[in-house]
Amino acid sequence: GGGGAPDGRLRAAFPTGGAKESLDPHTSSLFVDQARAKALFDTLVGYADDMSVVPRLAESWEPDATGTRWSIRLRAARFHDNRPVTAEDVLYSYRRIADPATSSPARKQFLDVDFAASRARSATELELVLHAPNFEFPSAWGAPATEIVPARTSDFTAPVGSGPFRFGSFRPGQPAVFRRFDGYWAGAPALAELEFVPVNDESARVAALLSGQVHYIHDISANSAQLVHGDGRAQLLAAPHGTMQAVALKVDRAPFDDPRLVQAVLSGVDREALVSVALSGHGQVGNDLFGKGLEHYPPDLPQRERDVDRARSLVREAGLEGLEFELLTSSVDPCFESASTLIAQQLAEVGLRVTARIGPAETYFSDIRTNGVAALTRTAPLPLTTFLAERMRSGAGTNNYTGYRSPEFDGLFHRAMSTVDGTERSRLLGDAQRLAREESGLLVWGFSDWNVAVSSAVSGIRAAPPNSLDWARFERASLG
Amino acid sequence: MKRPSVVLGSVLLGVPVLIALAGPLLAGSVQSAAAPLQPPGADFPLGTDVLGRDVLALALSGGASIVALTGASLLLSYLVGVPLALLVANRWADGVLVRVLDFLLALPGLLVLMVLAAAGWRGAVTLALAIALLQLPAVVRLVRSAALAPGCRAAVEAMTMQGEPWWRIHLGYVGRCALGPVLVDAGTRLSLVLYLLASANFLGLGLAPSASDWAVLVERNKEALFLQPLAVLVPAGLLVSLCTGINLLLDHALARRDEV
Amino acid sequence: MAALVLRRLVVAALQLAAVAVTVFALTSLLPGDTAVVVLGEHATDEQIAVLREQLQLDRPVWERFLDWLGGAVRGDLGTSLLTGVPVTDEIARGFATTAVLALLALAVVVPLAVAVGVTTGMRRGSRLDRALNSAIVLLNSVPEFALALLLVALFSVHLGWLPATAAGTSGWALLEQPAVLVLPVGVLVCKQLCALARQIRIGVAEADGAEYALHVRLHGLPERTVLFRHVLPNGLAPAVQQLARAVDGLLGGVVVVEAVFALPGMGSGFINAVMARDLPAVQGYALVFAATTITLNLAADLASHRLVPQREVVT
Amino acid sequence: MNAPLLSARGLRAFVGTRSLLAEVDVELRPGEVTAVLGESGSGKTTLGLALQGESRRGVALAGTVELRGTDLIGVPAAQRRAARAGVIGYLPQHPAAALNPLRKVGRVMAELARAPEAIPEALEAARFDAALLDRYPHQLSGGQQQRAVLAQAVLNRPDVLVLDEPATGLDAITKSEAVEALSRMSGRGTAILLLTHDLGLVRRTADTVLVLHDGRIVERGQHVLTAPTHEHTRALLAAEPRPPAAADTEPAEGGLRASGLSKVAKNGDRLLDGIDLAVPPGRCVAVVGRSGSGKTTLARCLAGLTRPSAGRVLLDGVALAADVRHRGRRTQVQYIHQDARASFDEFRPVLAQIARTARLTRGVSTAQARTEAEQVLASVGLERAQADRRPAALSGGQLQRAAVARALLAEPAVIICDEITTGQDLIHRAELLDLLAATLRTTSAGMVLISHDLGAVAALADEVHVLDAGRCVEHAPTAALLARPRTAVARSLVDSADLARGRTEEPG
Ligand SMILES: Nc1ncnc2c1ncn2[C@@H]1O[C@H](COP(=O)(O)OP(=O)(O)OP(=O)(O)O)[C@@H](O)[C@H]1O
Ligand SMILES: Nc1ncnc2c1ncn2[C@@H]1O[C@H](COP(=O)(O)OP(=O)(O)OP(=O)(O)O)[C@@H](O)[C@H]1O
Ligand SMILES: [Mg+2]
Ligand SMILES: [Mg+2]
């Protein structure tokens, strides 16, 4: 096998998108893109494990009283070509992201920004102006694909960033090699080199790790995690509160427009069993709300337990005994198919006849927006407010998989976002979530652990949920 | 010829067939009732699979459908393909049909299956038909090539002059001459079709992915190969045994035919 | 002769055209489009609409097909919707990997199949025959992924003799790291061996009983010559067709092996293109596959006819 | 007398309990030509094979065959073949089967030759044209195939030569040349075993003669031809074709008519060149010519088995399709293949195959068809028990007769016989010719008789066409042609034929 890395090069295996990759951080959509962007670039803020923001390039920030005008002060940092990171660079980057032509996944975070009114006050100070009050705006600066690039950059074949590693070599679909950037503002990384190796198949990644070909493997299933766990040559890094696993019941159409049926399903599902089987126990039970463990998650919610009798009587009440419906599923997530099978089996005991229907993985999330009445879905950690804004609000459009529309919820959410006081904001968000929990049709049955694995030769990497600052941070890693 | 190959073949074929036929009567519940991927123990003699189902019960109940479906697709492709090849082989050798089949061969099968799944034709019958159709060109080409030399024999001429209908000459005599390669092909195509059927399940075609079919089980438990090997190896072993047994018996039958 | 070749070329062109139309139609029948796939899980309708317009996906299918066809006739297969790279470049990339695998596998499997086929065919019913036959049938019916994973587990993870994956190496560069290729080629050989060897076996067994074989043996011709010049060629027509299928399969990309060993070849390239509804790329791959298939079929037909010279009398 | 090269003692061959050879003792001595005579089915081919330690599938051997100190029967196949390789040369009765269809004959010859110089010598001895070396077997005529295999047999100057019906495919001229070559070889010390029906050949070459009857040697010695003692031998030597049926009736209208038939082979050779031929009902037209002159090609064109490059074939004034498969009634023109064995389905019993004709042409029941087939088979001297076997278990002559029976059963308008007497002893030959003559008389069938056997031609044919290199060089009534051949080819054919001498010469 490959053995250690005498040259101090850490090799990290990621699934990649083949030839469609680029190093443009603003269009990155896959985890490997994010990881590479993280190595080459930096963002204004990062997310802690609970998705609260922590300063990065932004040293400090403050809103005005209306929550529409934000002043940001940058820290002293340099790009790889030794130019300082300035307010102009930040404005350029955000404009570029908001430009529809860039087609950036982060564009929606900046839709409310009034770029005409925003400006750089000095090299290290800038002011961003919003059309509407938003006291959670800093979350936007840490979202994926919001990296700061030098102003006027449009070619990313050999990009220059301010991240811990500088560009070495890269071709789409092939390995990327980056080198240590000694001028990194947070201190130069320990590694001399970092290589991203494309390995799409999960079992191949595990084999590559165990045989010593690579040092870090991204994203492995619960079963592989178990395998790695039992092997002395590698170490499993499992971050709890990883990915939300849920069933979206479409409440805007029959039969789930009947709240009794929604309640029946919520009561009829055995979340414990799902976690122990579909996730092989590598996860936590959900409580029909996104964001367990994140900032603004309502405290002291009673856990929803399975109640077959209640479910059955609700079904009977609604006159829907023996109702047949299809539960859409696919192989997008390794646990989907087991989960759908189990849910079908559990709901059969409630008197509902559910058939799992496999859909094509590649278009799955767009298919379930419009098709069917019930579908499995999942969401990686992101700030709770982002989730509520994008998935629950009436205006959220297509990402609202359950078709939930509630003026009451919208009002609570809007009030929360315009509230200066953090505690009050949290309370309002909590109310909104309690409401959504009953009505939105989202059945969150669990949270799967987020598994990566590293070779035992690697130190300095800790388990962290995806999208968080510490996930895929190689600058602190070293090869022992 | 040499009894050992018959004995070995019969045992290898007999075990899976017996299980396929009688298994469903003996099998317990195939619902997921326990933790997934448990090693063999008192409750579950062969452990559980990724869905927490009893591997023993699954193995017992999962033979019939896959064997039937595979048998149906294979039979269909040979029932159509062999006559087609024999009747076409020496008539319009470069004819339209062969070109059409070549076109079919050149179509990516995966795409066809995906479109079927997307269009909602997901039933077992559709699947068997589709797979038979996808096998057809290869079967026809093989049979055709095996029939080339026998088709030129003086015996064929003599039968023609006797007034024997041409289809009878080709199906009967030429077909018999080409039987060896055809049976050998069928024997190896068997495993191809088995796994093709299984992977079609995961495109949403044919059997449900939660079905207890052997081939589906193998695919389903892929990732557990090292955690609970039995969940893969038991169904795979039954399939391997089935294929090996059939091939050995075919060999024996062919050798017997040549001896007489 | 020239007329025959010309005719076959015209027919081949028609077949390719038919494949192109059908594949285009089939791909367009699949739900979703590139815009949806590229933007993924969190896309908004607006983003999708923008991208659709950029990729010209809002134009009618037949219009796009005619465009594509116009280019294809001039030898321009268009650019991939997904990557913006010319389709030819993209295919060329995967082709190198696939070619290395296929050629190596063939270089092993053909002589091996001949050896096994001849050995077993000449000793039909013997213990050796039984053992070898059971072994190759067994290798053939073991699920490919299981075979690959078990080999990796044994030789890479457990013994550490061979690399588990190509880990980023691809294309012709693979030849500089032969160790990487041992396991994938091994799996391919195991899967292809059975059909080929068994066709050779039955051909040999049937030709071995023929009078001309006895005749040259009576003359004391060395057994090797009898085998390779007299017996083997006579049962070979079906094996040649089988070989064509094997080559076709290998050049069409071997999805499982490519996945398990992280070798980005034509198989995964095509699947990615289909998954992404990347019509130009799908078309490009389908055309290359179809051209391969048609060429191989032609070659196999010519070889088959060469193996049955007495056919000229019949026509 | 010198020591035998090969000696067989108590040689037996049997199938199950049926005996094909019983207690045969044979010794082959250097320089001596031993001829084995015997009626068709008497076991000659079986003996020829057994003397090499070989046997057909299903046939078991017992006894000893000693060749240079090795018992060919007692040892394993590989050892046996090593012992006899290059020592015994063998010409099988059906040479076509001994030629690999995929290999050009010259290539195989080169492989078999121990020394390259041996090839021209062998070609010369077998009268095989070196220009044909570059051909595949199917591109050779029946006689050429036979000579190709003969050339292989004599290639390495074997000590022992076993020749099974070596003269069947040869025209009279070639045959006389071959006789000389054989004599030369035996003069050099080769021991030759001739298995044949051809009395002329035996007379001219044999030093000693064995007579085989039902697998037993009933008589042996130098006297056999001149003073046979066994009654079977006498019967065998005496049988005679009847004198030709006088063609007194005027030829009827209609019948088969071919005009301007030409055939150009794929390689550009002209095999037939503008042949015209008329076969009125009830008449027999013979086609003679040297081996390779195009007789079979002509017959196949008539039968619709080979597509002529030009010309057409009419039956009763109606044009027949060039391809028999497109002809309205395919049974109208029956062609009996030169290689009778190849024309049978190897998997089915001969009787069943023959019965199909009746079933297909006349739609009779299967049982009725069998009965009819048995009757016709009986008329050519085949018993039901024999005909119920697969072709491989019948002798060459038996199959030839079965093929004739199959054609007759179709009650065709025209019957084309391609060398149907080559495998027959005199008794069966006479029987066969009688049957055909009767057919001509009693039905209105026309007949094309292709034969090197001018005796048969004389017995049956009304007129004769002489082919040479694909052209018809002479065309005359039989008697006229045999008496006064006009062209050189015809003359040499008639002259070389031991028409008068070979067949009718009285013993003594
Ligand atoms: N397919 C072919 N291609 C080229 N030449 C051929 C082919 N078939 C036959 N010939 C040649 O045509 C000539 C006539 O062959 P044909 O079989 O008609 O002869 P024949 O008169 O029947 O001879 P025989 O008495 O030996 O049977 C021969 O010289 C033969 O070599
Ligand atoms: N496998 C077999 N089973 C039964 N009978 C057989 C078998 N093989 C040959 N015979 C019979 O043995 C007898 C001798 O056959 P053989 O071929 O030796 O005759 P032959 O003397 O060469 O005749 P011909 O002159 O017609 O060639 C024939 O009657 C034949 O039918
Ligand atoms: Mg004989
Ligand atoms: Mg001839």
Image (cartoon, rainbow, N blue to C red):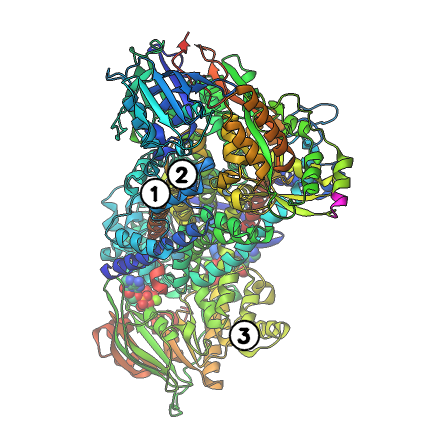
Which secondary structure lies at badge 3?
A: helix
Tell me if residue A317 is in the magenta stretch.
Answer: yes
Residue extending farthest front: A65
- Tell me the chain of label 1: C
Q: Nearer the viewer, mark 2 or mark 3?
A: 2
Proximity of marks 2 and 1: CB atoms separated by less than 8 Å: yes
Mark-to-mark CA distance, 3 and 1 = 65 Å
Res. B18 image quadrant: top right
Range covered by the magenta-colored residues? A315-319
Tags 3 and 1 both on a single chain: no
Tags 2 and 1 both on a single chain: yes
Residue extending farthest bottom: D250
- Tell me the chain of label 2: C
C210, B115: nearer the viewer: B115
Mark-to-mark CA distance, 2 and 3 = 68 Å
Label ID, residue C81: 1
Mark 3 residue type: Leu
Badge 1 crowding class, 10 Å Cα cut-off, few under 14, some 14 to 19, many 20 or more, is: many
Q: Where does label 2 land, which residue? A: C38
A295, C268: nearer the viewer: A295
Which secondary structure lies at badge 2?
A: helix
